[in-house]
Amino acid sequence: MPRPALAVEISQEQIAAVRWTRAGLIDGFAVEPLPLGALVPSPVEANVVDPAALRTAMGNACSQLGVKDEDVTLLVPDPVIRVFVQHFDDFPRSPREALPMLRWKLRKSVPFEIDDTVLSYNRQAPREAGVDIVTVLARQGIVREYEELAESVGMFPGVMLSSSLAALALLEEHKPTLLARVSGTALTTVIVRDGMVCGYRTTELPVRAADLTPQMLLDEIFPMTAYYQDAWHQGIESVRVAGIGARLPEFVALLQDEFHCGVLSPLHSAVADGRIPEFARPLVDRELEGLLGWMMNRG
């Protein structure tokens, strides 16, 4: 995968940009707020509601980093990109054969025409014989909205993925770990184990993070954890919750009682383990999980 020196993470609340040196150090970063309602993430409908506000925020962030005619990684809101983990007894090696097969398999699983998508996939080790395929796809017109936003300020998107996919690098490598990440009114629940994605689900919450209750969060993540326990015959051994900031202590007791394991922020866990270098602490302080995960992937 290409590794541009520049990455931009776009959410409903803000646009954050980071530039890295060739040695992998942070050369600079900028965060620009967005007006409420300027961006409404959706897998189906147009996302950009206020183009002028988005271009202004993107331009301001990029001007602080001296951006001019260069490649960029775009981290977009989770609802934009659908992620599926599928098992195959046999899977073709050639993308020419694999892509039509995946489009055919997923045609009834997305709320838009499957031929109107940008699709990518990756192999991973299965829990049994065969092969597991992680497929990510998004509606082509919505992808172009984000690409055009970047192009309007002199950037050329070379890589695009969801913020939570990028943030997975923050998680522990081996034990089954659940990530529950809130951004705006979207909740993404992911379970990883030994570097494999075992399940991925993005849902729309009825409230924003400030009004989310522990029981509401548990109710939303329960279907994914029940699926994992049934399919993999083991429980969750680590829980990481992101996107609720200083409210995390309110959620710890209920989640610990349910899963019988530690509940932490993925950022604080990675800092405590020494996996995030000291020079990246400014990004930790701003809770930029997607950009930090992408930085770790770059290494």
Image: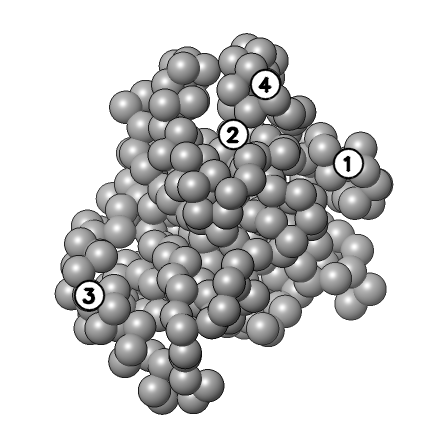
Q: Are discs 3 and 1 less than 8 Å apart at CB?
A: no
Q: Position of residue 41 (x, y in %)?
A: 31, 44
Q: Position of residue 227 (x, y in %)?
A: 40, 41
Please give the name of the residue rendered at 34% of the width and 46% of the height, measured from the top-left corner. 79
Dot 2 or dot 1, earlier in sequence: 2
Tell me the distance, in whole angstroms, between the alpha carbons under discs 2 and 1: 16 Å
Q: Amino acid at mark 1?
A: Val
Q: Amino acid at mark 3?
A: Arg
Can you tell which of label 1 and label 4 is closer to the viewer? Answer: 4
Residue for badge 4: 256
Can you tell which of label 4 and label 2 is closer to the viewer? Answer: 4
Please give the name of the residue rendered at 64% of the width and 25% of the height, measured from the top-left corner. 261
Residue for badge 2: 243
Can you tell which of label 2 and label 3 is closer to the viewer? Answer: 3
Can you tell which of label 3 and label 1 is closer to the viewer? Answer: 3
Q: Amino acid at mark 2?
A: Gly
Q: Are discs 4 and 2 less than 8 Å apart at CB?
A: no
Numbered badge on residue 107: 3
Can you tell which of label 4 and label 3 is closer to the viewer? Answer: 4
Tell me the distance, in whole angstroms, between the alpha carbons under discs 3 and 1: 41 Å
Dot 4 or dot 3, earlier in sequence: 3
Residue for badge 1: 271
Q: Is residue 64 visible?
A: no
Q: Position of residue 176 (x, y in %)?
A: 60, 42
Tell me: 128 left or right of 103. Answer: right
Please give the name of the residue rendered at 65% of the width and 53% of the height, measured from the top-left corner. 194
Dot 4 or dot 2, earlier in sequence: 2
